[in-house]
Amino acid sequence: MFKKVLVANRGEIAVRVLRACEERGISTVAVFSEADRTALHVRYANEAYLIGPAPSRESYLRIDKIIDVARKSGADAIHPGYGFLSERAEFAAACRDAGITFIGPSPEAIEAMGDKITARESVRKRGVPLVPGTEKGLHDEDLVAAASEIGYPIMIKAAAGGGGKGMRAVYDAGAIESAIGAARREAMAAFGNDEVYLEKLITSARHIEFQILADSHGNTISLGERECSIQRRHQKLIEEAPSVAVDEKLRAEMGKVAIAAAESVGYVNAGTIEFLFDAKDNKYYFLEMNTRLQVEHPVTELVTGIDIVKEQISIAAGRRLRYRQEDLQPKGWSIECRITAEDPFNNFMPSTGVVTYLKEPTGPGVRVESSLYEGCEISLYYDPMIAKLIVYGENRAEAILRMRRALNEYRIAGIKTSIPFHQEIMDSTEFIWGTFDTGFLSRRRIGPRSPMSPEHERLAAVVAAMIEHEEGRQAIAHIGAQNANGETGVNHWKLAGRMRAQRGQW
């Protein structure tokens, strides 16, 4: 096993990996930008090194700086987390060249699956069903002609990307040329590659993905599916495992297809095969492969009992998988809500500032993965996701009720968050019945409340101050009455504190 692991990431995923290393008895190294000097992952690691200014292109995306820190610190492995360099083949290659183990797939596998067109070609050879679409190297005029052959609506996709970047839905021929140009520009800005391709847009589809684990000894297993259809602009917001749309027979079939897709490129480590599922026709199609740990991996961990991050580390160290396919019997239901620093009632505008108060939910079946603490600053430099709230229940109904309870307990002050949005979704009849698809949010109006006027905000502040003053006065009067009655053994500071806690301040 490794002696020291460098975590080439930040935020909640860095904390998650650091914890897994600690439980393995592995020493850890964190890297941080100037904006993250006081970040939680810096405090958790055994060692921490500054790698540059706040912009990620000058810090977390600098392969040379991260490799240099690994050498200086004596780290024998690097875990990339997700995002940043996690799916960059050149980073995995740089680790290998430096004699440092990359906790993830090989550079060749990342490259093969990172180019979406190449990935389609690779999995087609293994009989994996594909959405009708175009191949590599087509010019704009060829794409326009292909769109007519495929039939509208179609989806334009960036060949080198994911996460919703470089994607455009087109519903008629009049908009195809401008949409191709816009998708190319966005793809170039996001990935440095403006190649795009077309796929048939399957309306009312569900986004179903399968978690796989593969070791270097030829063993590959499927950990089952995750439902990821609650999305905004192709960004997942809520995930769950399993999916209400997948029965045992379909689960086994899709799991085998996912394994075949991974094996088509000799994949080793943790990865995810994503599918579009057409519930009307009960057909599924390969979408892409994510060659890294997924944000939503905790829901799979809760229903399978497998720590995916620890398995990543073991696989990278050359060990065999500890599980066989027949050993896996998923149990219960898990739901994850991505908590973001955004205002859901103002078109999800980013919210920045200092977290002035934090109370995370606890209790049975509740898990929080976060890098927040009171006094931490949320900036515009990085992804708005600041925490993940995950719950587990014996069945989906219990999981939904538990998520409602946990969301009601969650308190983050100083910034606006997506918590009210998630509360609204948990109350949605369509979500409760499980009849949603990827178009769910496009059909739904988010945020019934209107913003508070400045006059009302000032009035609310005055009323809150008056209430606090009155409750403080009552607490002092209560303590004075006890003194007059000769009561002893009472800690008056604690008593006053309890009264403040009852109104939700502490």
Image (tube, grey):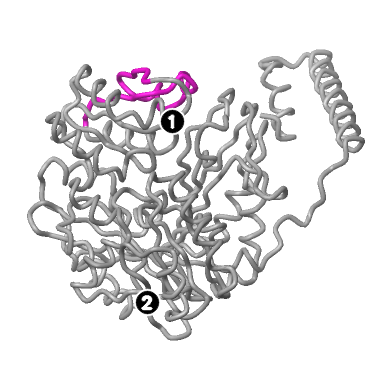
Q: Can you say whether 413 is above or below 485 in the image?
A: below
Is 334 on the left-hand or right-hand side of 459?
Answer: left
Image coords of residue 396 (percent x, y)? 49, 66
Q: Residue at x 82, y 22 (%)?
A: 472
Q: In the rendered image of this protein, does residue 152 appear above or below residue 346?
A: below
The residue lying at 19 percent from left, 21 percent from top is 71
Q: Quadrant of residue 212?
A: bottom left
Relative depth, front residue between 438 and 127 = 127
Looking at the rendered image, the quarter that the N terminus falls into is top left
Does residue 120 appear in this view?
yes
Q: Which label was assigned to residue 132?
A: 2
- Element under label 2? loop
Q: Nearer the viewer, mark 1 or mark 2?
A: 2
Question: For the residue marked with disc 1, what is the amino acid?
Answer: Ser
The kind of secondary structure element at disc 1 is helix
What is the x, y in percent for residue 400?
A: 55, 61
